[in-house]
Image: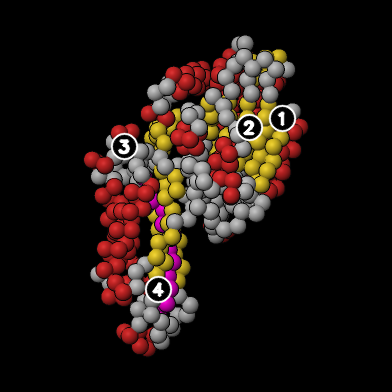
């Protein structure tokens, strides 16, 4: 097979890929509302000759598995879709093509230039919530296969195309694929990290601090205890812990040049009931990172100790300790760089060859300060997970966008990687 013909095949199907991506972005698949997008994905996979497995995640099936994160809210209609493309010969190595279809909330609509799910193109960029993170990756996975089909070919090994939910808050969608029995020799996840391979990623822990106060009329505020204001010294204590964890001597080697790889974020706060009443309650939600190899249980202990010490200096909290609830991400860090097995090296080399043929440059590594679903494959399924996707901007922000020429290059590299890794056979 001629590599240049694969690039031309991607070009030949690229208009279809952009139309597919546009339609997918128009489905507002925030957590709990992914069903229409997954219906669309299932139809497209069935039309493409895949065996389609569409199922609703049962928390009871995955709750005891390594990597499970505590569930937030209702799991009704949390639907995964997997399309399996079977090989006749199975001469090559099997592959999981994984991507998440859930997107984060859009925030105030008046902060967007145009509606967040309009999916419009301007100056070579497609705009819309989820366009970059990571529906463009789902499109590149699918149309890499379509490009091979355009040449009358398909992978000479089984390929499992996974469209999962829950990546943005737990990762339990990918975990449910493992529970379902999906395994392969390697996994490719095209998250939007600007055509670089992710060498390592941090872990993430979500938790909630719940505070009680002593309500009274504001005229007698001195006799009450303000639960919202009591949160302020706890913020400071958590940021002190953040500083300690980012100290040079505490860093994972792949993050040695990152001065601040572990980011703590006070992401949400609620409290009080009335402007003229001293607030009797306050709840705030926190995200904290941890390095590959660090223990989630150890991080929990350090958080609990930091909060307990800070509460001791507050007259009311000393007698009414804050409650800590862990919900959402309980994600370990993962380092592909630490996987020294031959299969990991072979997968990375195959992707490197594909990337160099398309771009003319060596594949650059990057240690990222976020998490992805790669950890499930790398830590719990002995499967090297390659995170490699297009250039995107303002993910999780306003006016999110993805560079369409970057999407084209990623699709070309992915098609070449599949042909190399899996081999090819005639349709």
Report the number of discs.
4
Asked if the residue under mark 3 is in contact with the one under mark 4, i.e. CB atoms within 8 Å, the reply is no
User: Disc 2 to disc 1, how far (Cα)?
Assistant: 9 Å
Residues tagged 2 and 1 counted as in contact (Cβ below 8 A) = yes
**Which image quarter: residue 280?**
bottom left
* Residue pointed to by mark 1: 50
| Camera-side residue of 151 and 57 | 57
> Is residue 97 found left or right of 258 in the rendered image?
right
Q: In the image, is residue 125 above or below residue 115?
A: above
Residue lying at the far right of the rendered structure: 47
Question: What is the C-alpha distance between the residues marked 3 and 2?
Answer: 32 Å
Q: Position of residue 60 (x, y in %)?
A: 59, 49
Query: Which residue position holds label 2?
Result: 161
- Nearer to us: label 4 or label 3: 4
Residue 427 vs 35, above or below: the answer is above
Q: CA distance from mark 4 to mark 1?
A: 54 Å
Res. 13 mark: none
Q: Are marks 4 and 1 in contact (CB under 8 Å)?
A: no
Q: Earlier in the sequence, mark 2 or mark 1?
A: 1
Instruction: Report the quarter where the N terminus lies.
Output: top right
Label 4 with label 2: CB-CB less than 8 Å: no
Mark found first going from the N terminus, 4 or 1? 1
| Residue 370 location (% of width, % of height) | 43, 43
Does the magenta-highlighted stretch encompass residue 281? yes
Q: SS class of the residue under badge 1?
A: loop
In the image, what residue occupies the spot 26% across and 68% down? 312
What residue does disc 4 label? 212
Q: Which residue is the site of mark 3?
A: 252
- Image quadrant where residue 76 sits: bottom right
* Contact, mark 3 vs mark 2 (Cβ under 8 Å): no
């Amino acid at each position: 097979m001629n590599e240049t013909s694969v690039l031309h095949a991607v070009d030949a199907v690229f208009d279809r890929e952009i139309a597919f991506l546009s339609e997918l972005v128009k489905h507002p698949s925030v957590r709990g509302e992914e069903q229409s997008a997954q219906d669309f994905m299932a139809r497209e996979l069935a039309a493409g000759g895949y065996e389609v497995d569409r199922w609703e995640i049962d928390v009871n099936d995955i709750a005891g598995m390594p990597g499970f994160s505590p569930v937030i809210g209702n799991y009704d209609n949390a639907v995964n879709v997997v399309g399996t493309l079977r090989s006749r010969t199975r001469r090559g190595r099997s592959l999981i093509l994984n991507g998440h279809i859930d997107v984060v909330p859009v925030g105030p609509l008046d902060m967007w230039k145009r509606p967040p799910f309009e999916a419009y193109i301007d100056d070579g960029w497609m705009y819309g919530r989820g366009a970059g993170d990571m529906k463009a990756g789902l499109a590149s996975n699918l149309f890499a296969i379509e490009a091979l089909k355009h040449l009358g070919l398909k992978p000479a090994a089984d390929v499992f195309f996974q469209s999962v939910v829950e990546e943005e808050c737990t990762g339990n969608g990918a975990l449910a694929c493992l529970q379902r029995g999906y395994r392969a020799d390697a996994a490719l996840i095209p998250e939007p990290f600007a055509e670089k391979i992710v060498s390592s990623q941090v872990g993430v822990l979500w938790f909630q601090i719940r505070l009680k106060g002593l309500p009274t009329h504001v005229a007698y505020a001195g006799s009450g205890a303000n639960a919202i204001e009591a949160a302020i010294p706890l913020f400071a204590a958590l940021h002190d812990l953040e500083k300690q964890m980012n100290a040079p001597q505490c860093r994972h080697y792949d993050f040695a040049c990152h001065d601040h790889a572990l980011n703590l974020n006070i992401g949400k706060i609620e409290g009080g009931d009335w402007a003229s009443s001293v607030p009797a309650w306050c709840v705030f939600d926190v995200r904290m990172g941890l390095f590959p190899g660090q223990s989630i249980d150890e991080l929990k202990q350090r958080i609990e100790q930091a909060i307990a010490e800070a509460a001791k200096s507050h007259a009311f909290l000393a007698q009414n300790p804050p409650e800590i609830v862990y919900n959402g991400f309980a994600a370990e860090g993962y380092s592909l760089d630490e996987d020294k097995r031959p299969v990991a090296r072979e997968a990375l080399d195959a992707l490197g060859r594909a990337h160099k043929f398309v771009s003319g440059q060596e594949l650059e590594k990057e240690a990222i300060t976020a998490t992805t679903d790669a950890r499930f494959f790398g830590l719990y399924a002995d499967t090297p997970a390659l995170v490699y996707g297009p250039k995107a901007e303002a993910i999780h922000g306003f006016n999110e966008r993805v560079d369409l020429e970057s999407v084209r290059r990623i699709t070309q590299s992915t098609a070449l990687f599949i042909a190399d890794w899996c081999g090819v056979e005639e349709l």
